[in-house]
Amino acid sequence: MTAPTAMPPVFLHPLADRNGVPSALLLDAGGLQADAVPAGALRELASGSMSCYYRLGAGQAEAVNHILDEAGWQPLPADKVHHSDSALAAELPAGAAWIEGDWFLAPPPKPVGSQAASRALALKLVQLVSADADTHEIEALLRQDPTLSYHLLRLVNSLGMGTGRRVTSFSQAILILGRSQLRRWLNLMLFSSREADQRSAMLLARVSVRARQMELLAKAAGHDKPHQEQAFMAGMFSLLGVLFGMPLAEVLKPLTISEAVQQALLAREGELGQLLGVVEAAEHDDLAALTQGLQALQIDGASFNQIQAEAYLWMQGVAAGKAGSPHA
């Protein structure tokens, strides 16, 4: 494992468009020195599907602008951004093209009708898969929700799995996808867009980045595949309380999850809790806590920046409905 170097970690955030859909990335580059710009990781992100912007501090060297421009990033006009940490107002400022802030963590609207039923069913499916239930039980529940059913078959067929024949049965899809990837997909579907909940798309973006970052951090810290899978699950479950507008402990109660994941989510304890703390520090632009956490994991800033780039690119695939099995 490499020792920490002078390359600092950088802070990235998704920006929502006026409809609340994640459509751009923002690099908070205030204080960043020209020789510390992670140009390679930033070029990778600029090649993705989202527009890439940066924001500099007052009096920063012109060389930083040049390097970021060369990497495919653009300066973000201050008058084009609306910041909100509470539920979005019905009317946004006329000139605002992008929305930043944690507005999507606000309490949810009360789910009604098919939205409530679909999320409840997805949670039941997560419970069944976590408990290693029989395939026929899982298949019977899938049949109750045409949206989940459609997306499952679409995913398996789009990934080109199997023998080249089109997959049309749930049992075949479950067999081909495997329990681990099925659980991963169901977790994502919990957060997938619902018309009545404007927060859905940004919550999915946040939780996708969390889960993938935690998985990659676990790998970089030298943990084995089962531990990496648990790290992904902890990241994915960490915002279920926000999603449902309930205490997280209450949402987790019926789920069959390990003690390590429970400790991480409810008390930020253990190795998984340490990983979650690192990711949350990055979300809050807390350089001191992030640096301390990375040092404890023996992961340097350059490696963390690359992990961020991979996680944000994976999130873009999730948002576009194209993310399959990541190969950590």
Image (cartoon, grey):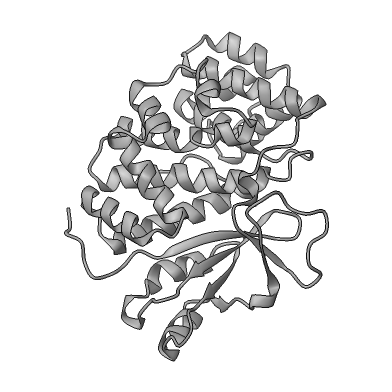
Q: Where is residue 297 in the image (x, y as percent from the top left)?
A: 24, 48
Q: Which residue lies at the image location 55% right of the left edge and 63% below the top edge?
A: 48
Q: In which quarter of the image is residue 137?
A: top right
| Depth order, front residue of 87/162 | 87
What's the residue at 43%, 48% (across, down)? 280
- In screen coordinates, is 94 left or right of 273? right
Residue 108 position within the rendered picture, expressed as x and y whole percent measured from the top left? 69, 37
In which quarter of the view is residue 191 placed? top right
Residue drawn at x 63%, y 15% is 139
Between residues 210 and 89, which one lies in front from this camera angle? 89
Q: Nearer the viewer, residue 239 or 145?
A: 239
Note whether 25 is above or below 224 in the view shown.
below
Residue 178 in the image: above or below residue 92:
above
How many callouts does the rendering have?
0
State whether residue 328 appears in this view.
no
Q: Residue furthest bottom?
A: 62
- Identify the residue at horizontal 36%, vertical 49% (top origin): 278
